[in-house]
Amino acid sequence: MTMEVPKKWFAICFSVFLILLLAAVVAAGDVHKNGATNPSPLETEQLQSQSSYNSSMAARAKEMEALNENAVQDPGEVVSHVEMTMRNHTERRKLGYFSCGTGNPIDDCWRCDPNWQRNRKRLADCGIGFGRNAIGGREGRFYVVTDSRDDDPVNPRPGTLRHAVIQDAPLWIVFKRDMVIQLKQELIMNSFKTIDARGVNVHIANGACLTLQFITNVIIHGLHIHDCKPTGNALVRSSPSHYGWRTMADGDAISIFGSSHIWIDHNSLSHCADGLVDAVMGSTAITISNNHFAHHNEVMLLGHSDSYVRDKLMQVTIAYNHFGKGLIQRMPRCRHGYFHVVNNDYTHWEMYAIGGSASPTINSQGNRYLAPVNPFAKEVTKRVDTDARKWHGWNWRSEGDLLLNGAYFTPSGAGASASYARASSLGAKSSNMVGSITSNAGVLKCRRGHQC
C-alpha cells in the first residue's frame, strides 16, 4: 500500500503537466496567428492568388512560345492562299453571287451579302495576311452582351462583355444594343473569341481596355476604343477558374502579349494613354486591317525591346488602314521580326510614319504617304537611336508606294525579293487604289437587311 499512493499521484501530476503544456502550445499558436506580422485574410488571398497566377502564367507562356514558333511556317503559302481566295471571290461576283466589289479583299468577302447578320461567322473565313488563320469563336455558340456594366472584375455578371471574354469555350460575342462600356480593369480575354460589334455602336472608353495575354485565335471587329486609362494593382479574372493580381497597365487600346493568330479589323482607335495597338513578347501571326487611327502620339509598337530576341519570330501584316488626323509617330515602330505594310493610307504624321530598331525587316508596298507641311518631317522612315553604319544593312524597302507632298522613304539592305519572303503576306494592289480600298476604314455602319 505504501507504494500505490505515490504511483497514483505521479500519474495525476504527469497528466496535469501534459494538459498545461498542450494549452500553452495552443495559446502560442493563437498569438502567432493573430500577430501583426502575419498577413490579413485579404493579403493572404492576394498572395495565394499571385502565386497561383504566376505559376499559371509561366505554364501558359511556355505553351504559347511553342505555339508561336510555328504560327506561320511558310509565308509563301500565305501569299498563294490569299491570291487564290481573291480569285475565287472575283469569280463568284462574275457569276452574280454578290453584286458589289470594292477591291478590298476582306470586305468583298462578306460585306456584299445583305444577310450578313445571319451569316456573321463568314467573317472568320475572310482573313488575310499573317493573321489569316485566326478563327476566333467560329466553332462556338453566340453570346449576346446585354449589360454594359463592369461592376466586379473578379466576379463579372452574366451578360457583360467581361463575363463573355473570360469563358473557356469558343464564343462569337455580339451586342444586343448600342453601348458605352467603361471598364474598371483590363479586359483580359481568353482564347478562341470573336468580339463582333457590327450593327450596333459600341464604345470601350474612359477606363481600362483590352489585353490579350498568352492566348490564341482572337478576332476583334467593329469597336470604338478610345480614352483608355492606366489601371491595375487589383484582382482581375482571366478565366472561369482563375483570377490574379494585376500590376499597373499602361493604358493601351489593345495590348497583345505573347499571343498568336490575332486579327484586328474595322475598329476606330484614338486618344489613349499609351499605344493604340501594341504587340510584344513573342507575339506573332497578326493582321491589323481596315482600322482608323486618329489623335494619338505613339500609335503602334511591335516588339518588346531591342534585347528581347524572341520577337525575331514576329510576323505582322498591316493592311488597308487609314492613319488619320492628329497622329505623331509609330505607324508602326518595329523591333526584330518581319512586317508587311501594304495598301495603307497615311494622311497625317508629325514626326515620322514607320520606325524601327534592332534590325526588323520592313516591306512597304502600295501605300499612299502624304507628307506633312513641315519641311523637316517629310521622311516616312526613322531608324530609332541607331547609327547609319548599323542600319544600312537592315532590309527596308518601298515598292510601288505613292509618295506625295515631298514624302520620301529611305531604303536600306538587300534589294532582292528573296530577302523579303518572310515579310510578304499578300499581293499588294496599286497605290492608286488605296483611296477606295481604305475609304471605309474604321467602324462600319451596318444595318439589318442591307449590304454592310
Image (cartoon, rainbow, N blue to C red):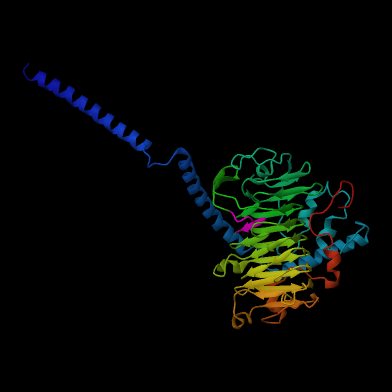
> Farthest residue in the top direction?
1
Is residue 153 shown left or right of residue 430?
left
Which residue is at a point 88% across and 52% down the rendered structure image?
A: 451
Which residue is nearer to you in this view: 12 or 447?
A: 447
Q: Is residue 252 magenta?
A: yes
Indicate the position of residue 149 as horizontal and vertical percent values: 68, 40
Above or below 449: residue 98: below
Q: Is residue 328 magenta?
A: no
Above or below 313: residue 238: above
Residue 147, picture quadrant:
top right
Indicate the position of residue 330 as horizontal and vertical percent values: 68, 67
Indicate the position of residue 289 as horizontal and vertical percent values: 75, 61
> Farthest residue in the bottom direction?
389
Residue 131, picture quadrant:
bottom right
Which residue is nearer to you in this view: 143 or 367?
A: 367
Above or below 89: residue 408: below
Q: Over which residues does the magenta segment extend?
A: 249-257
Indicate the position of residue 60 as horizontal and vertical percent values: 56, 54
Which residue is at a point 7% across and 16% down the rendered structure image?
A: 1
Q: How many marks?
A: 0
Which residue is at a point 70% across and 78% down the rendered structure image?
A: 418
Residue 430 seen in render: no
> Farthest residue in the left direction?
2
Residue 199 seen in render: yes
Which residue is nearer to you in this view: 254 or 171?
A: 254
Residue 156, picture quadrant:
top right
